[in-house]
Image (cartoon, rainbow, N blue to C red):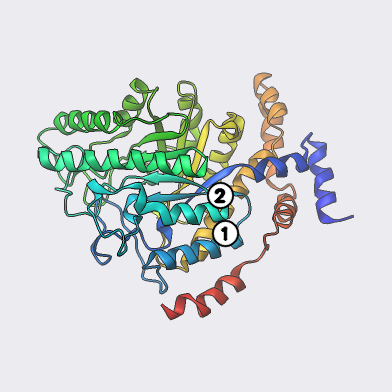
Amino acid sequence: MSRYDEAKQIYAKYGVDTDKAIEKLKNISVSLHCWQGDDVRGFDTDPNKPLTGGIQTTGNYPGRASTPEELMEDIDEVLKLIPGKIKLNLHASYAIFDDENPWVDRDKIEPKHFKKWVDFCKERGLGCDFNPTFFSHPKCDPLTLSSPNEETRKFWIEHGKACIRISNYLAKELGEPCVMNIWTGDGFKDIPADRIGPRERYRNSIDEILSEPYDFNMVKPCVESKVFGIGVEAYTVGSAEFALGYAAVNKDKCIPLMDNGHYHPTEVVSDKISALLTFFPEIALHITRPIRWDSDHVVLFDDETKEIAKEIVRCGGLDGKVNIALDYFDASINRISAWVTGVRNVQKALLFALLEPSNSLENMQNNSDFTQLMIVQEELKTAPFGDIWNEYLERENTPVEYFAEVKRYEQEVLSKR
Ligand code: RNT
Ligand code: ZN
């Protein structure tokens, strides 16, 4: 008997059908962040400028993509090494300018600046998500949508509106909804004198952006909250309460987005998913790995990632209620490997969650049988999960091992850049 067949029998004892779990996993879409490939630099401003808005990439591993062609080539390499259904996730700063469509500032970008990305996605059968880029730009004063300077604020509102139009275009061209996430790094390093002013302006600015017409079934604007950033330690305009409040009173126009690097280290997003789904029909997630701060390390198959995946599955999140995206950027290791490892780990966590006998565990909880609940949950941790994962990879024609291929690509392509 094959290892898979043996493992299948073991899971069957718990009432779990491993074939069904594998089938389900194949269709869960995970949004792949383009910004892992170039350390969040983009193509529309000086690539050597510092990142602003409180985010930081650390490391200087060779081979960073510095042109659209290189980034596309790298994404293709990643697609070879990952299973499952992928959506591409672009930032506005990845607009493609050329002789025909020369550079314009962020308030003036148009769908045509993303035509090459649309062609890229079409050829590979990918949907595409989008993000306005409210950071790393001379017009951050340092505030953007919450700036007291009307000219600055207007510039960024126009950027947001342009991004709604681009999201519309991506959704229409690719025939899949486009999740458009609004995140700004707006905030202050030190104690502010006025906390409510920036928040009221931020609210008004999002209102203006969302007044641009869109079909909410196809373009899904999100509001992402944050607790603090590097150099933005004392005050963040788009705090958790702000973003949730905004999303709650504008449920017909946008959805809340939680990034698991954006909370106090003892808070967990796995516990927040069900709380939000009690009130919102749909939510969005940025899956990352914070170490002590929002450090955006590569996602691992660790306890919190598993717990987040379990909650997504248990809450029915796989049926369109939870939009799953990745958000990390490690510049200290091979970037292809960083991408592949993180995507695989999110999928591993989802498979692990799909292999839970959710109904019987729920019954144990409801019958107050906490003794059995603990025993079974612990047993499942050492069930032969690896054999099911390997079977999934095989069915998806994806290699189990990828280090050798990552090295080959590094030698033949990345090291020559
Ligand atoms: C930053 C936010 C935000 C960004 C991306 C690049 O803390 O998480 O989502 O990482 O938009
Ligand atoms: Zn994020």
Q: Residues within 10 Å of mark 1 (few under 14, many from 20)?
A: some
**Residue 59's image quarter?**
bottom left
Q: Is residue 263 visible?
A: no
- What is the total number of numbered labels drawn onto the structure image? 2
Above or below, 288 against 72 in this view is: above
Residue 350 drawn at (x, y percent) = 61, 43
Q: Is mark 1 within 8 Å of ligand 1?
A: no
Left or right, 61 with respect to 11, comes to: left
Residue at 32 percent across and 31 percent down: it is: 243
Residue 66 drawn at (x, y percent) = 36, 68
Q: Earlier in the sequence, mark 1 or mark 2?
A: 1
Q: Which residue is mark 2?
A: 86
- Residue 326 tag number: none
Query: Mark 1 touching mark 2, by CB under 8 A?
Result: yes
Specify the quarter for ligand 2: top left
Above or below, 56 against 129 in this view is: below
Q: Nearer the viewer, residue 322 or 57?
A: 322
Above or below, 346 against 71 in this view is: above
Residue at 37 percent across and 40 percent down: it is: 181
Q: Which residue is mark 1?
A: 79
C-alpha span from label 1 to label 2: 8 Å
**SS at badge 2:** strand
**SS at badge 1:** helix
Q: Quadrant of the C terminus?
A: bottom left
Residue 324 drawn at (x, y percent) = 51, 41
The amino acid beneath tag 2 is Ile
Q: Nearer the viewer, residue 82 or 91?
A: 91
The amino acid beneath tag 1 is Leu
Residue at 34 percent across and 30 percent down: it is: 213
Left or right, 186 with respect to 338, comes to: left
Residue 26 drawn at (x, y percent) = 66, 45
Residue at the extreme right of the image, as rendered: 1
